[in-house]
Amino acid sequence: MKNIYPIDFKGLVLEGGKKINLRHIVFDGPLKKNQVLVKLYYSGICGKQVEEYNFKMGKDKFIPHLLGHEGSGIVLDTGSNVKHVKNNDRVVLHWMKSKKGGDAQPASYRYKNRKKYINSGRITTFSEYSVVSSNRITKISKKEDLKIAALMGCCLTTGIGTVINQSKIKKKEKTLIVGAGGVGLSIIVGLKIIKNENITVADIKNSNLKKAKTFKKIKTLNLLKENIK
């Protein structure tokens, strides 16, 4: 598929503090070693991306650049040394390195009809297409829902990993989850995997607590309405 280049597409570009714009972008190709071209179908929005948008991590020396590090899509082309995925494979894009594939040089994009270039990391997902390192993608079954699969790139893996890899919570221990957002709900999934049933979820939003209650045997606390020491 080397004749598909250059590719012209739309993407969100961070161009300054709290300055993000939808731009026409061009990737001239071809792919380099360990690079994979993916057509994006869905992307998650991580708290780290919000911090980048707000310049919470200090001055950003890579402006302008693309954003996003969790999503799902379909492989369109692969560079040299890529063996674990091929064209038309469905994949999850994730910020954490996998044991398959390798780091690639970050792709260079340019504004359409302008010579100025746009930076990127080894994975970006806020665009119609993305060139990512091969160790940031994992093949999934063609039967999987790509919308749900996008959550595996960060949200679900963070929550489940917190339970199994970091906290190492035991089956019979009491657990308190503060915040029933995407990661909080994913922590519940992790606790259910290890068969922990003594779970309390605290939040300030009833809508979030209602989502938590969709799991069986969950106690909830509204931190604004209940007197809690």
Image (tube, rainbow, N blue to C red):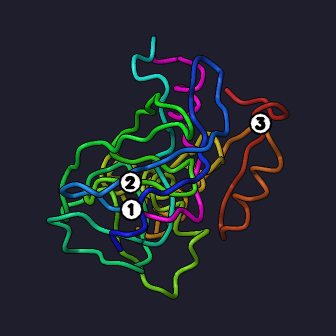
Q: Please give the range of residues in magenta.
A: 38-58
Q: Are marks 1 and 3 in contact (CB under 8 Å)?
A: no
Q: Are marks 2 and 3 in contact (CB under 8 Å)?
A: no
Q: Is 151 placed above or below 87 here? A: above
Q: Residue at x 19, y 74 (%)?
A: 83
SS category of the residue bearing label 1? strand
The tag on residue 131 is 2
Disc on the earlier residue, 2 or 3? 2
- 80 relative position to 128: left or right: left
Q: Quadrant of residue 161?
A: bottom left
Q: What residue would you read off at disc 1?
A: 37
Outermost residue toward the bottom in this view: 143
Q: Residue at x 47, y 38 (%)?
A: 110
SS category of the residue bearing label 3? loop
Label 2 Cα crowd, 10 Å radius (few <14 / some 14-19 / many 20+): many
Question: Along the line of sight, which residue is nearer the eye, 109 or 6?
Answer: 6
**Cα gap from disc 2 to disc 3, whole angstroms:** 39 Å
Q: Specify the amino acid type for callout 3.
A: Ile
Label 3 Cα crowd, 10 Å radius (few <14 / some 14-19 / many 20+): some
Question: Along the line of sight, which residue is nearer the eye, 114 or 145?
Answer: 114
Q: What residue would you read off at disc 3?
A: 204
